[in-house]
Amino acid sequence: GQQLNQSPQSMFIQEGEDVSMNCTSSSIFNTWLWYKQDPGEGPVLLIALYKAGELTSNGRLTAQFGITRKDSFLNISASIPSDVGIYFCAGSQGAAGNKLTFGGGTRVLVKP
Amino acid sequence: DAGVTQSPTHLIKTRGQQVTLRCSPKSGHDTVSWYQQALGQGPQFIFQYYEEEERQRGNFPDRFSGHQFPNYSSELNVNALLLGDSALYLCASSLWRQSVEKLFFGSGTQLSVL
């Protein structure tokens, strides 16, 4: 079946640092999305990407849709404590009904 | 405007039992999808309902079934529960022909199977 491989699985951030995570797939997706999930909540959409090569920003977040349509990355600039959480990439092949395939998540933690 | 609401928030069952989870979609939405999120993993698509019919299904056994009502709310039923069914069950709603970024998730039902 389709799989999205997300890396790193976890990372520690210090306030002010830039962080980066990426997602690769064995299948082509027509839409890539990045979600954040806080404890006890469902995923919340951060950024949606629709075209190969597209680079999109949402505040301190920047994401790119890979040229091959099999990968995407998410950058967070100047991290702040509320950036802690789990980030998921997800892909859609665009058929009616919007089924999503999710990656395994990147857990962002604060450096002690 | 209420978002996607799910009930109950937590549930404990024993192996072999049956469970029903409920979801009310965001106001104005007509399509409901269900996802299973095991601990430490990303959500996995179970199935999707539109016009009271199952439209798409993921790789889940027949023990997982669902229903959509005329008011667009939905139920997820799991029969013969296994320990491995312990997970957060997420409901997501949308409009059938809207782009995927219009999918909204509920906070989930945490199911523990003992």
Image: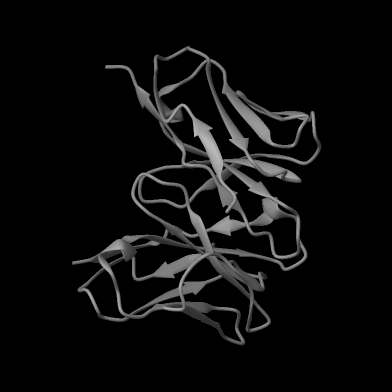
Q: Position of residue B34 (x, y in %)?
A: 51, 66
Question: Which of A59 and A14 lies nearest the eye of the viewer?
Answer: A14
Q: Residue at x 50, y 48 (%)?
A: A43
Q: How is the image coloured?
A: one colour
Q: Position of residue A110 (x, y in %)?
A: 34, 22
Q: Residue at x 57, y 28 (%)?
A: A22
Q: Quadrant of residue B110?
A: bottom left
Location of the C terminus of chain A (image quadrant): top left
Q: Quadrant of residue B111?
A: bottom left
Q: Is residue A84 left or right of residue B104?
A: left
Q: Is residue A110 left or right of residue B68?
A: left
From what the image shows, is residue A78 above or below residue A52? above
From what the image shows, is residue B70 above or below residue A37? below
Q: Quadrant of residue B26?
A: bottom right
Q: Residue at x 66, y 69 (%)?
A: B29
From what the image shows, is residue B70 above or below residue B34? below
Location of the N terminus of chain A (image quadrant): bottom right
Q: Position of residue B88 (x, y in %)?
A: 37, 58
Residue sitting at the far bottom: B70
Q: Is residue A108 left or right of residue A89?
A: left
Q: Position of residue A14 (x, y in %)?
A: 39, 14
Q: Is residue A19 left or right of residue B82?
A: right
